Amino acid sequence: MGATDFAKLPHIGESVRRKEDYRFLTGAGQYTDDIALAGTTYAVFVRSPHAHARINGVDKSAALAAPGVIGVFDGADVAADKIAGLPCGWLITSTDGTPMKEPAHPILAQGKARYVGDHVAMVVAETLEQARNAAELINVDYEPLPAVVDVRDAQQAGASAVHTEAPDNHCYKWAIGDKSQVDAAFANAAHVTRLDLTNNRLVPNAMEPRAAIGHYSRATDEYTLYVANQNPHVERLLMTAFVMGLPEHKVRVIAPDVGGGFGSKIYLYAEDVCLTWASKKLNRPIKWTCERAEAFLCDAHGRDHVSHAELAMDKDGKFLALKVHTDANLGAYLSTFASAVPTILYATLLAGQYTTPQVYVEVDAWFTNTAPVDAYRGAGRPEATYLLERIVTRAAWDMGLSQDEIRRRNFITQFPYQTPVALQYDTGDYPACLEQANQLADVAGFPARQAASKARGLLRGIGYSSYIEACGLAPSNIAGALGARAGLFECGEVRVHPTGSVTVFTGSHSHGQGHETTFAQVVASRLGLTPDQVDIVHGDTGRVPFGMGTYGSRSISVGGAAIMRALDKIEAKAKKIAAHLMEASDADVDFTNGEFTVKGTDKKVTFGQVALTAYVPHNYPLDKLEPGLNETAFYDPTNFTYPAGTYICEVEIDPETGVVRVDRFTAVDDFGTIINPMIVEGQVHGGLVQGIGQALLENCVYDRETGQLVTGSFMDYTMPRADDFPEFKLGHVCTPCTTNPLGTKGCGEAGAIGSPPAVINAVLDALAPLGVKDLDMPASPHRVWEAIQAARS
Ligand code: MCN
């Protein structure tokens, strides 16, 4: 079935209420910490208080003697049991010919601690209180070493080395584009706009902190890991194949209800392996639930780029070439997907929505004594969009053009479009998004609103951002061509029961995105059922055949597409059964709205009758047709999906206090075919809140001297709240994706990708009359006030 026919089916485009909300809103959800296994023990991790220290010894004796303690483990125990380090550098290799440095990442520190919060020991006790008390008794002999936390400091000659394998802290270099062509274009430019900018480090802060239970069964010699994770099959694959050396079928990973992940739960973390490994040694289930303060230290962080960009233009503001250099902070260890974030997911997006003929991007990635940095909502694409949309707006101001005019002059309008940085966009209508955003934002009324603000002693500014992202992460062919060591796809199994109801087993994982509803809409629409007749099972390697999980806004476009393929097979087989029932030829059978008919006759049977026949055969041609109606399919698309849109932000600033208030925010997106408008709207709202949060409030800061995390709690790390935002105005343009059968483009990250530059462009527009030319995120009152004072002096 093609995407156009699919979009016309019942339930597609319908705001079906979320099926999962009943259990969430009535307290019936089951998160990892809710699971109570008989004989459960509790783990507490002893974490390094130093950013960098040699570990000369770990004295466990007092802890082992403490009440209730049944086990204490450190790096030496891990080494003795030959548990390997966490897998890293999974997705990329250096492009300059030198191998990427991949230092070992032991699950409990061995010889050295490399960031505040690094795992040094694990205490297991009968109760959580006993484990906490015993953890206090562990005496670690630390010899503090100089630490380096800032990516600029890490590259200085003589900087303290985080790993001996990388004496200059350099992990890899990655470049894309044709440098000589870019240089030639710059030589002929009428104007060059230059910009230095920092993309601030963020802490993901999902509502449910990470949690896990390791459980070994002596009866079956099998392990079960319950874990708040976004991709249980990948977790199992990495843990068994790379770390513990176990046969995969002896490990089951269950990710039950998960309260948000935003990327921070896609990795195999040290705690997960420690619990699984020790549960066999102690022959008891072991539970660990992360404390919020602990999460600040040891969850993978996001962003943290320092970049320099140059944009060459002709005299009319037409882009000729873009040149970018970025230093990416990787933290102390290479996290699972870390190397893909500042490379494949970042540099390839720097053509944006524009016809810029030449783009060259060079990335240097560095180790520092900070928590590992990995994917956080958008992962690389917010960093690309922030850089590009800031420099485009700066270029507009340099050239005396309006923010929308410079974009209009450079938009791609012909599709498919091959960018100079590897990607080929299939569809889009960028001018339509911009014009709709201009209308919805009432840009024509801006001057009057600005004058009214001025009359009240306030500054008002407007900022644009026209983002594009590559999501629907999968295309193994493209990932492989860019140097990735593994491809991605998705798997779906559709099991039709004898009574005609359906269970779907998907490798995608829902942790807030509403898959139990939208995936049910897809299946119901194809089979002529209601969404209530379709149950979606996910998050369990013991029930779902295989899966690659949820991140990169891939689930509907890749996981949904795998289910569509399985449905194609179901439909083909069901038609054969229907043909048998109606004594017709398969080729003459049609299937619409849950009914099978024979062309040119009034014969018909329902989907329910066919389902029953599949399992309770009567005069069934067993020699030609197997009983059962159960199909599995895999889907690996040929391209990413390319959601795009224009966001317009309007801010009002009090120059006396530096407080920025977002007064209006308009987002027009193109997500192709939309399955559930209400869920998509929720996704956009969530993304906007995170993106605007980054632009104005959130900032993860390490002390440059001591390496201590300064913003280690919600007292110091400002989370956005509802009253920080106006009501968002949303609009949509639809150009269906051509590389999946649903026509969908991912929507889960767009808000976080497109919004930060719109906000900062608006802030700079407001501050322009005072002479403020630049500002880094977050535009906190303090920073804005300081910038105003600096411009005045
Ligand atoms: N959808 C739709 N029509 C479309 C596109 C999507 O109806 N054209 C629906 C989907 O069926 C799905 C939801 O919107 O129910 C999001 O779909 P998709 O864009 O495919 O994204 P994923 O389901 O793969 O979710 C991942 C994405 C990412 S990468 C982050 S980060 C993120 C996000 O989703 N983390 C979230 N949204 C989140 N929402 C919550 N509540 N919690 C998180 O941790």
Image: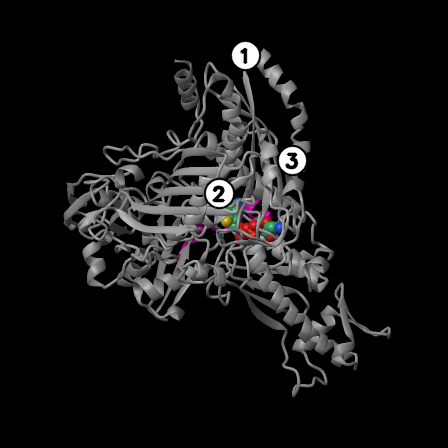
Please report the residue visible at 21 percent of the width from the left and 45 percent of the height from the top.
161
Residue 594 within the magenta-colored segment of the rendering: no
Between residue 617 and residue 204, name the one nearer to us. 204
The magenta segment: 21-37
Q: Cα distance, mark 3 to mark 2?
A: 27 Å
- Badge 1 is on which residue? 457
State how many labels appear: 3
Amino acid at pointer 3: Ala
Q: Which residue is mark 3?
A: 437
Q: Residue at x 62, y 15 (%)?
A: 452
Identified by mark 1, the residue type is Gly
Element type at marker 3? helix
Q: Residue 121: image x %, image y %?
A: 23, 50
Q: Residue furthest bottom?
A: 623
Q: Residues within 10 Å of mark 3 (few under 14, many from 20)?
A: many
Question: Up-down: is 149 above or below 357?
Answer: above
> What SS does tag 2 mark?
strand
Helix, strand or loop status at disc 1? loop
| Nearer mark to the viewer, of 3 and 2 | 2
Percent x, y for residue 566?
61, 68
Q: Is the residue at mark 1 in contact range of ligand 1, meaning its CB lies under 8 Å from it?
A: no
**Label whose residue precedes the other's in the sequence (1 or 2):** 2
- The x and y percentages for residue 653 are 51, 20
- The residue to which callout 2 is attached is 321
Q: Residues within 10 Å of mark 1 (few under 14, many from 20)?
A: few
The three-letter code of the residue at mark 2 reads: Ala
Neighbour tally class for label 2: few under 14, some 14-19, many 20 plus, Cα within 10 Å: many
